Amino acid sequence: MVEALRAEVERHTDEVAAAPWLALTPADRGRLTELLGEFRVAVPGSALPPSESTLGIGKV
């Protein structure tokens, strides 16, 4: 049950998060990727994102 809920939450958040990206043209996506540069790689590995889910479903 928890796994199904988590999968549904992940599917929905992926869908919502994709909307702004998909609204950009391919050229704009490329430019945004350039502008983010090292930041895009550094943040996920930085331990800055919370280790606990804000959805109340436990450890991420």
Image (cartoon, helix red, strand yellow):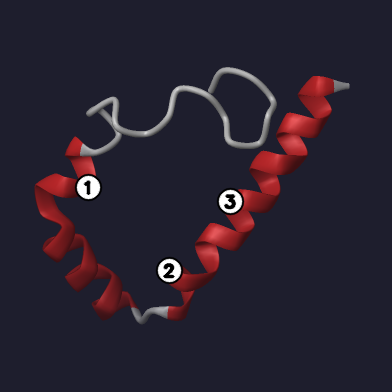
Query: Marks 1/3: CA distance?
Result: 17 Å
* Dot 1 or dot 3, earlier in sequence: 3
User: Residue at the location (68% across, 29% down)?
Assistant: 56
Using a 10 Å C-alpha cutoff, classify the residue at mark 2 as few (fewer than 14 neighbours), some (14 to 19) or many (20 or more): few
On residue 40, the disc is 1
User: Residue at the location (76% across, 40% down)?
Assistant: 8
| Callout 3: SS | helix
Residue type for callout 1 = Arg
On screen, residue 45 above or below 33: above
What percent of the width, then of the height, locates residue 45?
Answer: 25, 27
Residue type for callout 3 = Asp
| Callout 2: SS | helix
* Dot 3 or dot 2, earlier in sequence: 3
Q: Is residue 56 left or right of residue 2?
A: left
The residue labelled by disc 2 is: 21
On screen, residue 60 above or below 7: above
The residue labelled by disc 3 is: 14
What percent of the width, then of the height, locates residue 49?
Answer: 37, 34
Query: Marks 2/1: CA distance?
Result: 14 Å
User: Residue at the location (22% across, 68% down)?
Assistant: 32
- Name the residue nearer the viewer: 25 or 43: 43
What percent of the width, then of the height, locates residue 48?
Answer: 29, 32
* Dot 2 or dot 1, earlier in sequence: 2
